[in-house]
Amino acid sequence: MGVPAASAADTATPGAGSGQRAAADGKLIGKPVILTGEGVDKKAKRPRSAWRAAPAPKAKTAPLSPKQAMKEAMDEARKAGAESYLDTSKVPLTKDGQASAQAAALGLPPTDLGDEPPAQDTNQCLDRDGASSAQGETLNRWLWCQKLRIGVQYFKIIDGEPVYQGTSSVAFHAVAVGNGKQRVLRTYLQAQYDSVEYDDWSLWDRFFTAPNLKMFILSDCAEGYDSCFATGSGIEHTFDEWDYHREWLHWDIYSDEAASTSPDKVLFHHWHFRFGGSGGGYVGPDATTADRTFRCDSAGYFSQFDVDYPKACVNYEVIPHLQYDISDTRVASVARHIRVAQDTPDKTYPIELEPKHIPGKYSGSRDDQGLQRVPDGGVVAKSNEDWKNYACNRTGPYGGDQAWRGLPPYDTATQDCDEYPFQSTEQGASSPNWDFSVRAVPNGENRSAGGLLRWYYFSDRILYNAADPFWVEIRD
């Protein structure tokens, strides 16, 4: 069903100055509002002051720059405590340290999305406290959710002045799911059964006026149509009909790679739900929910189990981080090494004459220096390997009369020389801006840690560019 149009005179709202007097006496005019938190529940006490006005739709804009998008997204992630992480202790490995086929059960990137969001992840997301927050809950880069109440505060023009009549609202569950093979984000919305509330209306209006007023809703992209566009039209029901509407609604938001000049054709976008009312003597403006950020790419270097994932869109308001557990015997020595490197870098090899600074520790803050992935076998990775080998083998700058600075001899038959930050990062051993650490660890543990790192890159879709930092957390 299409979105109903409104005339210029009909779009006036209470408090909008002289424009509101264009509405005839007796006409209902509305103010779109949103509520999150405890007030979402049916029968909750909802004073008018608890609602916040929904923002008016903005003019279409150009795509965000990577730097701007990262700052905005990390700020939102920090406020919401949104963390996208891989618990590596749960990832099954083969004997040679690679993620086994059973790892697919942890959840491969979503691809063939249906009329309803993935049930298990959706329920897990909605069960978290963050789902009721203003930012919603980002379960991981592939799924975001929120519980919210959307409604309209109605005013009647009496003697030229707006007089509050009541608020009509519906509780919704919202979900946004990325796609691992296409540049598309699918947004879902489900009205909660028997959740419509008519706050503050008179008894007469509660039964005869408010239920017959209408509200429409749809999903849209905030950026211009030359880079981002949504499919589908607005869905409109009376509030009485919304009360019994159980089906999930969904809209797709596409990103056009032709609009990008960045590596991997990366584009950052905002999306939101747009809603408003019509009919039953009501006039008023449209409004939107808060913008959420997502990122789309055409990076052709992601594959798993002989399946390619050449394009994708992911939720971006989340702090991506990798976890290793010291209690995981498959990687215990590597985890201990990373913890020492992050917490007491001056107690690591190679020995430096100045205090060492080693980045990448996860603290939940974007202010800490993260790690950026680089291509395997590329110039940076190869240089990192060379410098690691200098420190491990007491050669190059760590040879000769400087050999005391390098790693002491170790049993190369049973141990590998492990390095942190990882060889596959910009902050690795050859970085001119950051220090590094090497330590001898059992070769099986080193292979397992490497396999889990590769699985993490895949599962969190970590790109080869500086706009996609990640952090490392060591747990007991």
Image (spheres, rainbow, N blue to C red):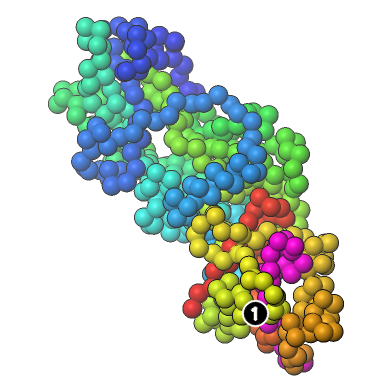
Q: Is residue 102 visible?
A: no
Nearer to me, 361 or 116:
361
Image: 151 above or below 213: below
Nearer to me, 331 or 346:
346
Image: 223 above or below 459: above
Q: What percent of the width, then of the height, locates residue 119?
A: 47, 55
Q: What percent of the width, then of the height, locates residue 7?
A: 44, 11
Q: At 69% across and 52% down in the image, what residue appears? A: 466
The residue furthest left is 203
**Left or right: where 42 falls relative to 236:** left
Q: Which residue is mark 1?
A: 348
Does the magenta stretch mainly form a helix, a strand or a loop?
loop
Q: Is residue 403 visible?
A: yes
**Left or right: where 56 falls relative to 20:** right
**Left or right: where 98 falls relative to 233:** right
Q: Is residue 435 magenta?
A: yes
Image: 431 above or below 326: above
Q: At 28% across and 22% down in the image, what residue appears? A: 154
Nearer to me, 81 or 230:
81
Q: What percent of the width, then of the height, locates residue 369?
A: 60, 59
Image: 142 above or below 345: above
Q: Secondary structure at mark 1?
A: loop
Q: Which residues are magenta?
A: 413-439
- Place residue 227 in its image quadrant: top right
Query: Disc 1 residue type?
Result: Thr
- Place residue 436 in its image quadrant: bottom right
